Amino acid sequence: MKKAKFGYQNAYGGSLFFLCWVAYFSTYICRLNYSAVMPELTSSGIFTESEIAAVSSSFFICYGLGQLVSGSLGDKFSPRYMIFWGVLISGAINVLLFFCYASYAALLILWGLNGAVQSMVWSPILRIAGEYFNTKEKEKFGIDISTTVPLGTLASYAVSLLTLVFLPWRYVFLTCGGIVTVVALYWFFGTGRVLPHLKKIDYQRKSEAEKPTALPIKRLAGMVVSSGLLVLLISIAIMGTLKDSVTQWIPTFFDSQFHTGTSISLVMTMVLPIINVTGAYFARMVDHKLRNELKTSAVFFGIAAIFLVVLMLIGSKSMILALICMVGVTNCMFAINVMLITMVPLRFSKFGRVSTVGGFLNAMAYVGCGLLNLAAGALLQKTGTAWNVLFILWLGLAIGALVITGVCVIPWKKFVRRENLNETEQD
């Protein structure tokens, strides 16, 4: 039987991509299921809006801080084992939450721990892409793996909704945890079969010099500063906020503003990831014309700002318009996420630091989201769920990110040109 290649040059490469895709896809099932039950937590009165937001932020902050550690470790230790333990423990934590759901302290600690262990997945996946795929395949890998985000979001909401139809909301944690535990085992045994074959295959690198080498941290830090990535961290934090915080608050917004109920809110929210799958391919299309990841990101920040203006003016009056605007915003953020969190780190694969850079940039996205999500919860509680105030905050962030990203375009362009020139001279 012929094995699927998924567009890669051999079946083992295609299998490795699929395993990476499934592993990261599964993390969203045990990440956004909490968002799916947030309306139930709010309506039941078990926790306040601030407490609900604090639990949500505990995941983002621990995930972000964890990325700083796991990113560096991902360049030193086996990515296969890091991904396995990250996915397996995340599943186990969700199963445990089924029994501890009524305790605020347990929910806060366990959800934060869930974020910490999930941080062990993304950066090692980038390292795998850098080591096992050639230059052309890396770009394809980067675009294709990004579809895990919207499709994983869809899967999380779908599993949660199906569970809520038949069972009390705490069973959402049990169902999602069980699924992800199975995926962890699939990853472990699947990579055990595929990786030994890939290590014997020549991936047509031009020369020995093209293989990843560990760049000293001091030189890497200099590159981060000179390329503009240090300043860009602000834009990355804002992108993370507009991608995950908007997605997270949508079910609560529809339920409180239009009284849709939890199930209908989740059905409407599931429209977002279905459309957001296109974000990665829109990003590639625009970037092929602009040839600059940061310039492409600035364009999408500008489009998102326009959607937020419309949302602020008339979104609270029309459920359909609100949904369209939120789809537009999150689609733009997914496009930016591909550029800044996937394609930018992959440029450092030839220095043996793709995991370190990927973890560093991804950390900023989630730490920023976590802190701003705390502010959102406090703001909604203080203003009595005055959503327009939150929309204005999001608009201000989008405009700020547009300006900052625009400033970083030129130094990034110089960095890419310089590194490409050095690579040509070495050849």
Image: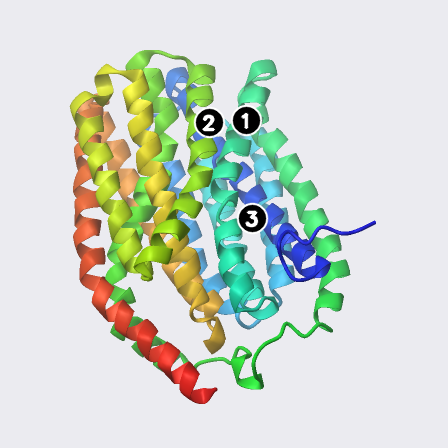
Identify the image quadrant of residue 163.
Answer: top right
Q: Picture coordinates of residue 173 (x, y %)?
A: 57, 31
Residue placed farthest to the right in the image?
1
Residue 213 sits above or below residue 251 on the image: below
Instruction: Using the numbered discs, state the Cα–Cα distance from disc 1 to disc 2 in whole angstroms.
Output: 7 Å
Side (left or right) of 184 relative to 149: right
- Residue at 41% from the left image edge and 66% from the top image edge: 357
Residue 110 sits above or below residue 69 on the image: above
Q: How is the image coloured?
A: rainbow
Numbered mark located on residue 308 in the image: none
Marked residue nearer the N-terminal end (1 or 3)? 3
Q: Label 3, on which residue? A: 24
Marked residue nearer the N-terminal end (1 or 2)? 1
Q: Nearer the viewer, residue 5 or 78?
A: 5
Instruction: Using the numbered discs, state the Cα–Cα distance from disc 2 to disc 3 in whole angstroms.
Output: 19 Å
Q: Label 2, on which residue? A: 270
Is the C-beta separation of discs 1 and 3 under 8 Å? Answer: no
- Residue at 52% from the left image edge and 50% from the top image edge: 144
Identify the image quadrant of residue 271.
Answer: top left
Q: Secondary structure at mark 1?
A: helix
Numbered mark located on residue 158 in the image: 1
Q: Can residue 366 be seen from the camera position used here?
A: no
Side (left or right) of 4 relative to 169: right
Residue 377 sits above or below residue 163 on the image: below
Specify few, some or many for label 3: CA neighbours under 10 Å numbering under 14, 14-19, or 20 or more. many
Specify few, some or many for label 2: CA neighbours under 10 Å numbering under 14, 14-19, or 20 or more. many
Residue type at numbered disc 1: Ala
Q: Secondary structure at mark 2?
A: loop
Is the C-beta separation of discs 1 and 2 under 8 Å? Answer: yes
Q: Picture coordinates of residue 175 (x, y %)?
A: 62, 30
Q: Nearer the viewer, residue 156 or 199?
A: 199
